[in-house]
Image: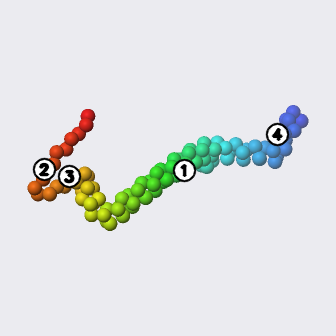
Amino acid sequence: MSNKLKPLYRNFYAVACFSFLMWMLFLDSNDLITRFKMSSKLRSLENEKEFYQEKIKEVEKDRQELTTNKELLEKFAREKYLMKKPTEDIFVIQEN
């Protein structure tokens, strides 16, 4: 019966390597598909990280400007929080 088998199947090391390769590519918890999904998720998270780091830099710059410039602080309070002086009226114009 062993004479009918191909020489590759009779070689224990070839069968073991093939089995190990199939196990690692498809059946293991760290298989090829999972690794691809995880690397894709990692790239998207790194892009988000860069985006938020840029936003943090912008906010830090704005905060620095607001703490040093009183006129800018007043402008910011008026525009963002609709604050006003007691003798003023505010009209908010919204564009459709």
Q: Quadrant of the C terminus?
A: top left
| Mark 1 crowdedness (10 Å alpha carbons): few <14, some 14-19, many ≥20 | few
For discs 1 and 2, the disc positioned in front in the rendered view = 2
Q: Which mark is residue 42?
A: 1
| Mark 4 crowdedness (10 Å alpha carbons): few <14, some 14-19, many ≥20 | few
For discs 1 and 3, the disc positioned in front in the rendered view = 3
Q: Secondary structure at mark 4?
A: helix
Q: Which residue is mark 4?
A: 9
> In 3D space, how far apart are the residues under numbered discs 2 and 4 (Cα atoms)?
90 Å
Asked whether 11 or 76 is in front, the reply is 76
Of the residues under marks 2 and 4, which one precedes in the sequence? 4
Q: Secondary structure at mark 3?
A: loop
Q: Residue furthest bottom?
A: 68
For discs 3 and 4, the disc positioned in front in the rendered view = 3
Q: Quadrant of the N terminus?
A: top right
Q: Which residue is mark 3?
A: 82
> In 3D space, how far apart are the residues under numbered discs 3 and 2 (Cα atoms)?
10 Å
Q: Residue furthest right?
A: 3
Q: Position of residue 6 (x, y in %)?
A: 85, 35
Asked where in the image residue 70 lies, by quadrant, the reply is: bottom left
| Mark 3 crowdedness (10 Å alpha carbons): few <14, some 14-19, many ≥20 | few
Q: Is 74 situated above or below 31?
A: below
> In 3D space, how far apart are the residues under numbered discs 1 and 3 (Cα atoms)?
41 Å
Contact between labelled residues 2 and 1, with CB atoms less than 8 Å apart: no
Q: Which mark is residue 89?
A: 2
For discs 2 and 4, the disc positioned in front in the rendered view = 2
Q: Position of residue 30 (x, y in %)?
A: 61, 49
Of the residues under marks 3 and 4, which one precedes in the sequence? 4
- Which residue occupies 60% across, 44% down? 36
* Type of amino acid at the residue the image marks with label 2: Asp
Q: Secondary structure at mark 1?
A: helix
* Type of amino acid at the residue the image marks with label 4: Tyr
